[in-house]
Amino acid sequence: MGLGGEVQHQTEGCVCTSLQIFAEANQDLQKFGARVSGEILSLGQECEAMPPTLQNFDARVKQVDLILTCPAWKKLKRISAEEGLIAIAYERKYSNWSRVYQAAKLFMFSSSSGMFICPLAMTDGATKVLEVMKSSGPPGEAFSHLTSRDPKLFWTSGQWMTEHKGGSDVAHGTETVACKQVDGSYKLFGFKWFTSATDADMTMALARIMDAQGSVTKGTHGLSLFFLKLRDEQGELNGLEVQRLKEKLGTHQLPTAELLLDGARAHLVSQVGRGVATIANMLNVTRIYNSIGAVGSMRRIVFMARDYATQRFVFGKFIKDHPLHTQTLARMEVQVRGGFLLVMELVKLLGLEETNMATTQDSHLLRLLASVAKLYTGKQAVAIVSEGLECFGGQGYMEDTNLPVLLRDSQVLTIWEGTTNVLALDTLQVLAKSQGQVLQAFSASVQDKVALASDCSELASSVQCLQEALGRLALQLKNLLGQGSTSMEMAARDLVYTLARIYIGALLIEHAAWAEASPSDIYASQRWCEQDLCPLDTAQQAGCYEADAVCRDIELVYEESPTFKRKGSAQASAQTEV
């Protein structure tokens, strides 16, 4: 991941070398780090202590539906503009490295900023869509607000996709309709069951366009994407009502609401019926943000646990001097390093794509790794943060330590923007649609990275483990293709875990082979490659995807269920009658 070398990057008339980019970015990151550890951390804690509230009516019983957020939340919005947390990516001062620079700042910001990374994720996702679609009119005008460094002009965006039926199946769950007006705009009518960052200035929403006869097109091809502002020029709500704020396990700092759309004025962003295809760009960005948040929370808890271990004295010595405790911290550290490299590789690929520098292999990897990284780092975060709380003993369970909030907020990372199973199935689709090209790109990239360690004897066993895992992956995918779609679906989770572990292993080896790598970098790659790098193969050999596995799984889960018993009894009665 290093920016080493004197590679030149042309950016609007200014030629910068990689070393110049690193020097400038590093200077800003040093300053930003000081701001994060002081001002931003304090504001984030204030947001947790003062969550948003909803005021439906004013003193004259007029419905106002005001979402009231604390001063700290508003200050974090101003800081986001000042620091260019969105602008950096679109100014592209540092060409393809702009995304990496932005991700570094977001990584530092995420776990200290009271979940303000969530509205930033949706803001960046909306900005990406508007840029790709080359939007004009009101949506086009919004772009300059979303990318502004001026706090007075900066906007954040929401993302309104989920409705009463909930879930990721927007094709069948979206009932909101859009009625075209004579001026070319639309009015939206429907109910949005889950809207994050509902205090945003604007949002993107899916809806079905209603024709003159009052009919809409069902399914994916009936969905279009719209832009709308939440309030008009007079500050009045734009044809919507805030029904209630959501009560959630975590992310209390973030206003999340149920909304009734009753004639909300909106503008078409996508082509008619191409809403789902258009939000693919948005999903790539928001999934990357989810991954950044995951590695940020892991890094934070490991740093805190590491520091605590030097201060807590039990059983005659500091807990850092107890080998088992240090081993636990080391295992956590390896996970954090691996997750971080995966995320930064992903944003590097995004930067290449946005500057038209991506190869075909890069493009295939970007589409694949966006789902893989979001899935894997989300699961990592919940496990590592939970383990991290244990490192503090009983103090990890006490609210006044500000530790439990890290675990509560981490749980959303496995759910938002696609649960583990949804993303696993999405990965299957990516592999299937490319007819083997994505998998070839994956394998070639892994081989290229491990080849850099060919002269390092300390990494030889790790390289061998990785190459063996790659071979096992190819063999089992071939076997699964012959077993049918049901077996492939059952293997989806293990497949993504395999892809993640192999690729992270390759990234750790690549980093360890770097001339400036430390002995700890080598050790981290060794420890990573000691685990089962191909759980797909392990499960396949255990018969987990065989034809009768589905029936056995159903029986195991529902054996004591009244529903299952009634079904079984009915089958038994039918057999007796025969």
Image: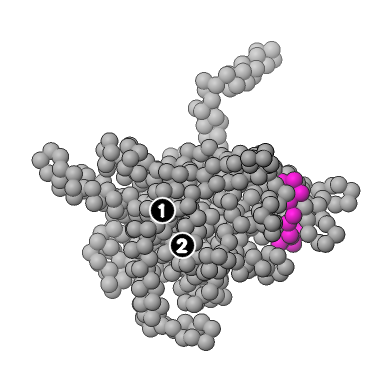
Query: Residue 113 sits in which quadrant?
Result: bottom left
Q: Which of 528 and 477 lies nearest the eye of the viewer?
A: 528
Return the residue found at the far front. Answer: 60
CA distance for labels 2 and 1? 11 Å
Q: Which mark is residue 92?
A: none
Q: Which of 70 and 566 lies nearest the eye of the viewer?
A: 70
Q: Are marks 2 and 1 in contact (CB under 8 Å)?
A: yes
Q: Tag 2, which secondary structure?
A: helix
Q: Amino acid at mark 2?
A: Ile
Q: Main secondary structure of the magenta part?
A: strand
Picture coordinates of residue 405, whole percent (x, y): 40, 43
Q: Amino acid at mark 1?
A: Leu
Q: Tag 1, which secondary structure?
A: helix
The reply, left or right, for residue 328 in relation to residue 5 is left
Q: Which mark is residue 43?
A: 1
Residue at 63% across, 57% down: 202
The reply, left or right, for residue 106 in relation to residue 175 is left
Q: Is residue 271 magenta?
A: yes
